[in-house]
């Protein structure tokens, strides 16, 4: 790791270590810590004194003004991938090697330039639950379904430099990042040692979990991540930093999940999109590192870029616990002191924030969030009313429908609110051992009180790592959880990503007539995400998941009503929830550094299925044209470079409302039997039982483009009231599938646009949310506003993001999507003024026209260069080949 012109040294343990000292820049001592991390990054990487000073002033001036600043180039120390988003990235790398070879270059030049870690954690599904063989059986099914993908990933690990892959069945990438990979500061250098801040970007929006460990990182699309991996810095405008002032301490029985849901509610209402958030105040020291990580994990749910907790003694305790040696920790502490960001230096420091939000930890209450958005927090006492209000919006009323379901010869009468899934899962809450211990204690108390699991509730227990499982085992809680139906069924991201598997068949059979629910200790509960059979989804701490699974319904007020009936009568929530002292005592007894050392020994080994995969370390990948999992994408062959963008005769593929998420845009979850993707798979000889999920087939662009905008809950105003992946066929004058209409447009040589409302592309940072529309022929998206990551992904794929002027929208302009759109030329050759506007003419069917301007949301000169090259991938290839 080179160090630029800002070179200094500090001493630790008799060793002199080089570093870029941020305090040499006037005003840096008043910057938020996260901006100092960015400042160190640009100072260290600067190639001249002039470049260093210009970038430094950009950050300091913006920080001290408490507002957004100019463009800087940020180069993360490493990149983190999960397999759903990672596979297409490495498919692109492999295709880039082919393209380099086709141009007469050396394909071996195409390699990640910084460390890349991929964790296979998103392809396991809870097909088998509530039995001792669940984890082994699900691992077997996962291996069979994903053999092609896993072979490709194993080839990638062998063939590319700077790549390490954690095999399936080990854990969730964000929890493993906390336990195994976060360092706070990294020592590198080819000759003399150099120290710099640990930082990362990841192809999952919850990469922000690392912020709880004092490591600055956030989620980006796979498009942006692969460019960073290939040595291209991430261009960004210096973001404003919002300070969250924490006071007090959490009350008895209140968990990190309750705090995270309160953050989501509070900060979403304030509006922090595109900003950094930094926590400070005396309340911070009352939170453990894993509690902070829980809050930081929830960052995408309120829209900011990161939620940063500066490193302190709690951070170092976590590092030591998970295996970092004392000498390394002392070196990190010395580095932080040298940079003036240790706890002592920050105490009382006059730091400037763009605004300060006060949160009193003592006022946080036990909470849930739902029925469809993580920031829709509700107290336990208000859950039943929240459920019923949502039920009424769907034209239903409590008890208006009663259905009989049979399990093992016994009949049960269920009404609206019946619980289809209860899942203890996710990188959010599994990261915090206290919450997992509490869930186990609820199961233990339920067992002691004679409670019994209900057969219609599918119960999922997917710990975030084997360390968590070992903690539960040492605490004697694995067996009680299994008795309540929560047997460990695998290690990975299950329910949050829609991998809970199908509901039990009797529940699936009544899903159209009953409003079924789910409860999960996760971070995502968007419409249609958890299960297509479940109408309302609620997030909660693991202990609540276990408790509500015993109630069997969410149409209940557990602040007053009994959870269930035990052997001695009614059992209430207070009878089940453990005391804080009980949780702390167990944690102290079972959590130790030897536990993490023992569970980390086989991190990269994999199970027998992984080890049996035989691959060769060839320079280029041997594509199988018959594969339905991994196919060479067309981005390099189809890329068209041009400094001028214009459209003529474009038609709308969709007219969408507010908060269209990447769950709507990017294929995810199960492949519906009547979908274009299913039709493609059948044409290639794939039986329905082998369809797998969209996520597992992300390495095949043919499948993914057919799943674009195919979410079962998508509301497209052009679909004449039909919900799902449908739109108006402008040529056939009928409603058809999104994919089929896009193919008709391609046959007619007609470009496509999408109309949308506010926060288009919110949610997970999926690259396919931009890749798939590009493959369908979408050239521009005209929206009221964009989510940060998705906007940059659109630019990276050569789709122009255009933003209606303030106060204007498709509705206010009278646009319904049946118009013909012309976009006047936008010239990128000389760079764009900020803001710049494109002139758009929409010709209505009656011959009248609407003319309006929309802001061109290509926000930086570097983004303009990407766009002019036809996208970020062709740009990077040309750069590397040059």
Image: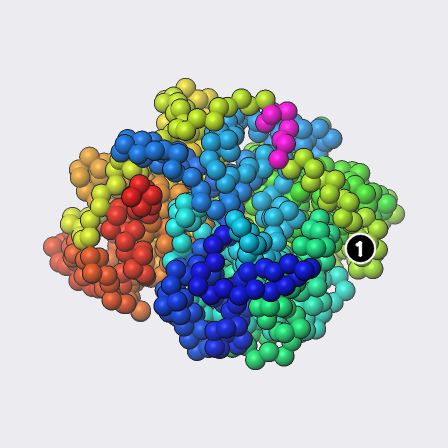
Whether residue 414 is visible: no
Residue 22 position, x and y percent, is: 51, 69
- Residue 557 percent coordinates (x, y): 69, 57
The reply, left or right, for residue 72 in relation to residue 430 is left
The residue under the point 73% across, 43% down is: 597
What range is drawn magenta here? 604-611
SS at circle 1: helix
Q: Is residue 592 above or below residue 350?
A: above
Q: Is residue 89 left or right of residue 638?
A: right
Q: Residue furthest top?
A: 685
863, 693: nearer the viewer: 863
Does residue 375 appear to the left or right of 131 in the view shown? left
Mark 1 lies on residue: 583
Residue found at the very far left of the displayed protein: 847
Q: Does residue 313 show up magenta in the picture? A: no
Question: Where is residue 158 shown, x and y percent of the image?
Answer: 50, 31
Determine which quarter of the picture holds residue 215: bottom right
The quadrant of the picture occupied by the C terminus is top left
Q: Nearer the viewer, residue 225 or 59?
A: 59
What sort of colour scheme is used for the picture? rainbow
- Residue located 74% across and 67% down the image: 251
Residue 759, percent from left and from top: 40, 59
Using the rendered image of the protein, determine whether residue 203 is visible from the camera's viewpoint. yes
């Amino acid at each position: 790791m080179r160090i630029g012109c800002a070179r200094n040294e500090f001493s630790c343990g008799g060793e002199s270590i080089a570093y870029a000292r941020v305090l040499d820049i006037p005003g840096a001592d008043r910057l938020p810590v996260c901006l100092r991390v960015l400042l160190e990054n640009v100072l260290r990487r600067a190639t001249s004194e002039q470049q260093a000073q210009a970038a430094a002033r950009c950050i300091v001036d913006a920080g001290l003004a408490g507002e957004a600043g100019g463009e800087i180039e940020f180069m993360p120390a490493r990149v983190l991938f999960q397999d759903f988003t990672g596979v297409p990235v490495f498919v692109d790398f492999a295709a880039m090697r082919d393209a380099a070879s086709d141009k007469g270059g050396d394909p071996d030049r195409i390699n990640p330039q910084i460390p890349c870690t991929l964790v296979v954690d998103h392809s396991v599904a809870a097909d088998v639950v509530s039995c001792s063989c669940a984890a082994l059986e699900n691992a077997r099914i996962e291996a069979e379904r994903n053999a092609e993908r896993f072979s490709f990933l194993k080839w990638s690990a062998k063939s590319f430099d700077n790549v390490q892959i954690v095999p399936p069945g080990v854990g969730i990438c964000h929890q493993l990042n906390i336990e195994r990979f976060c360092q706070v500061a990294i020592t590198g250098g080819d000759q003399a040692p150099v120290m710099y801040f640990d930082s990362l970007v990841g192809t999952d929006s919850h990469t922000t979990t690392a912020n709880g460990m004092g490591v600055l990182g956030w989620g980006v699309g796979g498009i942006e991540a692969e460019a960073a991996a290939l040595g291209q810095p991430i261009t960004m405008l210096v973001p404003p930093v919002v300070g969250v002032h924490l006071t007090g301490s959490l009350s008895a029985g209140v968990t990190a999940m309750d705090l995270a849901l309160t953050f989501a509610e509070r900060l979403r209402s304030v509006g922090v999109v595109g900003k950094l958030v930094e926590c400070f105040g005396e309340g911070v020291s009352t939170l453990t590192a894993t509690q902070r990580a829980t809050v930081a994990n929830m960052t995408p749910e309120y829209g900011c870029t990161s939620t940063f907790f500066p490193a302190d003694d709690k951070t170092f305790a976590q590092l030591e616990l998970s295996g970092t040696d004392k000498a390394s920790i002392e070196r990190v502490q010395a580095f932080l002191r040298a940079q003036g960001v240790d706890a002592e230096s920050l105490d009382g420091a006059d730091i400037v924030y763009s605004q300060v939000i006060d949160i009193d930890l003592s006022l946080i209450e036990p909470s849930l969030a739902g029925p469809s958005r993580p920031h829709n927090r509700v107290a336990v006492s208000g859950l039943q009313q929240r459920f019923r209000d949502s039920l009424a919006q769907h034209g239903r009323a409590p008890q208006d429908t009663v259905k009989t379901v049979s399990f093992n010869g016994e009949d049960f009468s269920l009404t609206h609110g019946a619980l289809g899934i209860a899942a203890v899962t996710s990188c959010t809450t599994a990261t915090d051992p206290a919450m997992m211990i509490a869930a186990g204690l609820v199961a233990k108390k339920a067992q002691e009180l004679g409670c019994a699991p209900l057969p219609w509730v599918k119960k999922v227990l997917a710990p975030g790592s084997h360390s968590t499982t070992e903690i539960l085992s040492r605490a004697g809680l694995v067996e009680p959880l299994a008795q309540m139906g929560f047997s460990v069924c695998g290690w990975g991201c299950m329910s949050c990503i829609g991998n809970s598997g199908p509901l039990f068949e009797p529940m699936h059979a009544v899903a159209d007539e009953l409003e079924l629910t789910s409860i999960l200790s996760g971070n995502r509960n968007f419409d249609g995400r958890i299960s297509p059979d479940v109408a309302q989804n609620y997030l909660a701490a693991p202990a609540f998941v276990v408790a509500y699974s015993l109630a069997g319904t969410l149409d209940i007020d557990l602040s007053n009503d009994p959870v269930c009936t035990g052997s001695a009568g009614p059992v209430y929530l207070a009878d089940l929830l453990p005391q804080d002292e009980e949780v702390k005592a167990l944690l102290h007894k079972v959590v130790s550094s030897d536990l993490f050392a023992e569970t980390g020994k086989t991190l990269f080994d994999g199970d027998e299925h992984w080890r049996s995969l035989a691959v060769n370390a060839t320079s280029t990948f041997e594509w199988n044209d018959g594969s339905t999992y991994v196919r060479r994408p067309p981005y390099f062959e189809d890329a068209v470079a041009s400094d001028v963008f214009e459209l003529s005769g474009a038609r709308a593929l969709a007219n969408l409302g507010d908060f269209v998420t990447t769950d709507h845009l990017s294929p995810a979850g199960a492949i519906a039997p009547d979908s274009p993707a299913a039709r493609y798979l059948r044409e290639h000889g794939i039986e329905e039982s082998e369809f797998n999920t969209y996520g597992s087939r992300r390495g095949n662009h043919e499948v993914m483009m057919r799943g674009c905008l195919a979410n079962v809950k998508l509301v497209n105003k052009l679909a004449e009231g039909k919900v799902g992946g449908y739109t108006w066929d402008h040529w056939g004058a009928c409603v058809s599938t999104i994919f089929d209409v896009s193919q008709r447009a391609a046959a007619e040589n007609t470009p496509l646009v999408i109309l949308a409302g506010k926060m288009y592309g919110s949610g997970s940072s999926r690259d396919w949310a931009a890749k798939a529309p590009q493959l369908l022929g979408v050239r521009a998206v005209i929206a009221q506003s964009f989510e940060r990551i998705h906007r940059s992904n659109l630019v990276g794929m050569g789709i122009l993001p255009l933003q209606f002027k303030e106060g204007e929208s498709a509705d206010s302009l009278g646009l319904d999507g049946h118009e013909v759109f012309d976009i006047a030329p936008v010239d990128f050759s000389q760079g764009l003024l900020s803001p710049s506007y494109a002139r758009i003419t929409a010709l209505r069917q009656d011959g009248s026209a609407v003319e309006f301007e929309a802001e061109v949301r290509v926000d930086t000169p570097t983004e303009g260069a990407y766009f002019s090259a036809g996208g970020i991938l062709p740009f990077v290839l040309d750069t590397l080949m040059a």
